[in-house]
Amino acid sequence: MIDLLKLSPVFLIENTIKERKHMTIQSTTLENGLRIISDTIPTVETVSLGVWLNVGTRNETKDINGIAHMLEHMAFKGTKRRSAVQIAEEIEAVGGYLNAYTARETTAYYARILKDDMPLAVDILADILQNSTFDAEEFAKEQSVIIQEIGQSNDTPDDVVFDYFQETCFSDNSMAWPTLGTVDVIQSLKPETVKNYMQNHYGAKQMVFAAAGNIDHEKLVTEIKKTFTSLKADCSQKLDPAVYKGGEYRQKKDLEQVHIILGFEGVPYGHSDYYTLSVLSTLLGGGMSSRLFQEIREKRGLVYTIYSYASSYKDSGIFGIYAGTGQEEVKELLPVVCEQLKQVGSNLLDTEIKKAKAQLKASLMMSLENTSNRCERLANHVLIYGRPLSAQEIIDKINAVSKEDLAVLANKIFMTRPTLTTLGPIDHVMSFEKVCEQLRC
């Protein structure tokens, strides 16, 4: 008998991939440009499916900031065939789930449903994306709901600080604006404005219909052809470049903690350093055994929470470190963080690199256990790369990251102009100039 506890994570991951060869990915592109991709998993009883669009906050102008999110809300508020209540009742009558989200470069409308109810989910998605009525009464209600959502975000410091950070990173660029928009803009929007935005941005070529689970690809294609019949073929537009600038934002507020994000320019999707930065971020602040957590929380007790993350976009990216700390502890926090960043490129350990890679690979494989994750992964890969990346392809790229790659990237990133965002009782936060001086930038 094989003792699984003695096997390496890499052995388990690679053999898990081999065992999954019965799963098939198929794709079809319709004449209007709508891409359909499915991942068939015959061992489950459900299907996760949805439409992902190459449209988000980045496609807005400042005078309509928040319109993409408003549109996402309004899509569920009634069509020519269904009222808002009917949309909810039909999907829930069969035990299904329907939702959506708006991001900076994408918008998604998705469902999870039992395999036999796939045609219903496709029909509802097609209905809300082609036949929404933008009823004035429903529109006014949803304006109020979104204004409350903005208020809730503003009342959540460890949430809103990320909006301030994004704005400081990209200054007066569409990449800087909050996804929720602002109260003034949301109040000024009209149903016709949102309807026109949908007609001018929701084209078939901007969409990917993805599905994962117990799905028959040809049946899926047939249902989509039958229901998605009135889309414009192409609504592409030229986007302004996302230019990272960096700098400082400080807001003094009566809170118990200081919320801090220290960040730098990252890398876009497809960049040769994309996976190198993922490993570096995991090594620095990707878990309880990471450098930042061990040094700053465990050894010094300076924070309750600290972690690092990397976000990539089509033509840019950011790397950030978030920490929540007390107003006295903050005096020591930033100097220690800066010292850790300065040192990391010159004292990397093989053991911590191996551990960071294992974390990334295990996280990838665990995510594949969920049909919703598989569906979203498929859609995003097609939007970004034009094709799905296999798990083995991603694992190979992670494995290929070397100590030298990590050292070069660390020395490069942490010498560039930082972004520092602070919110709360900030009197004792180190100045931006001293942060730059300590990082030698």
Image: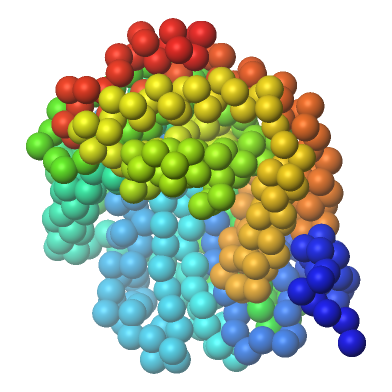
Q: Nearer the viewer, residue 279 or 208?
A: 279
With respect to residue 371, does 89 lie above or below? below
Q: Quadrant of the N terminus?
A: bottom right
- Left/right placement of residue 84 relative to residue 102 reads left
Q: Is residue 391 something one can see in this rendering?
A: yes
Residue 207: image location, x then y, percent:
58, 53
Residue 114: image location, x then y, percent:
56, 88
Q: How many marks?
A: 0
- Left/right placement of residue 179 relative to residue 273 reads left
Q: Residue at x 33, y 67 (%)?
A: 76
Residue 212, quarter of the rendered image? bottom right
With respect to residue 43, does 121 lie above or below? above
Residue 11, quarter of the rendered image? bottom right
Q: Nearer the viewer, residue 196 or 300?
A: 300
- Left/right placement of residue 321 relative to residue 190 reads right
Residue 93: image location, x then y, percent:
39, 91
Q: Residue at x 79, y 52 (%)?
A: 395
Q: Nearer the viewer, residue 218 or 13?
A: 13
- Left/right placement of residue 254 relative to residue 368 reads left
Residue 82: image location, x then y, percent:
33, 77
Q: Residue at x 47, y 33 (%)?
A: 320
Residue 79, quarter of the rendered image? bottom left
Q: Residue at x 73, y 79 (%)?
A: 41
The residue most toward the left is 254
